[in-house]
Amino acid sequence: MVTPAPTQRQATPEPPLSDDVPVPALLQAYLAGLSLPASGRLPPEREMAAALGTSRPALRKALAVLEAEGQLWRHVGKGTFLGPRPLAAIGDIAELARRAGPADVVAARLAVEPELAALAARHATPAGLQAMRAAMAASRRPGLSWRGYEGQDARLHREVALAAGNPLLLHLFDQLAAIRRVLTWDRPRERPDGPPPGHPSFDEHEGIVAAIAAGDAVAAAARMRAHVAAVHRLIASG
């Protein structure tokens, strides 16, 4: 008599989760009790799902809920991290700066910043215009160093981007501005003590803000385009 071979035991399928299981709340409680690394990186999904007694699809839905609320963020290929997404992840900025050149920066700025200026002309508030003028005034302070001037220049351009009222374009602007600073941080200056009183960017900034204040989107875009091109010509010649 031939004894039949024992049949292989089949894994018990995971029961579907009931709709009333509050997975996001369970996940929040679980994460609150974890000791995370300094980076805030969460454990792998399989580990979290096992700890919660949930399926991985249900866990992913809960992660998406917390991400939408700004409680965590995900970086493809690197993991999930606790806290709000940084405006510009430093590792990403460093890698992009290594791959980009001055011509890439000029092209990107010309694609983004004139449109931001045009949108600012349509949407800027009195408070936004006041912030732009404050940055321009600060950039003209006597005795300001180049680093100080560049800080006020960056402040002005971001106020324009902020006034545009488009959070997606603002995020792109922030990424681009960070990359531009990486590429120009150590460039030599003809005057180490700061920009001269007749520095051309002063008048160019005034023209941009005047067009925005007048609500002239076409002029705002044209003046921003001319300003960005002029700045990069100066950098290339220096």
Image (cartoon, rainbow, N blue to C red):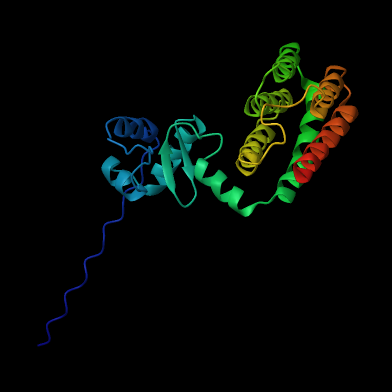
Vertical placement of residue 137 versus 157, above or below: above
Vertical placement of residue 16 versus 173, above or below: below
Residue drawn where x is 30% and y is 47% of the image: 47
Please state the horizontal and vertical placement of residue 171, each as a whole percent of the image.
Answer: 63, 35
Which quadrant does the C terminus fall into?
top right
User: What is the quadrant of residue 180 in the picture?
Assistant: top right
Please state the horizontal and vertical placement of residue 190, each as a whole percent of the image.
Answer: 72, 36
User: What is the quadrant of residue 118 in the picture?
Assistant: top right
Q: Nearer the viewer, residue 230 or 26?
A: 230
User: What is the quadrant of residue 173 in the picture?
Assistant: top right
Q: Is residue 139 left or right of residue 46?
A: right
Task: Pick out the residue farthest to the left.
Answer: 1
Q: Is residue 226 left or right of residue 11?
A: right
Residue drawn where x is 77% and y is 19% of the image: 124
Residue drawn where x is 60% and y is 41% of the image: 182
Q: Nearer the viewer, residue 119 or 7?
A: 119
Q: Is residue 59 left or right of residue 67?
A: left
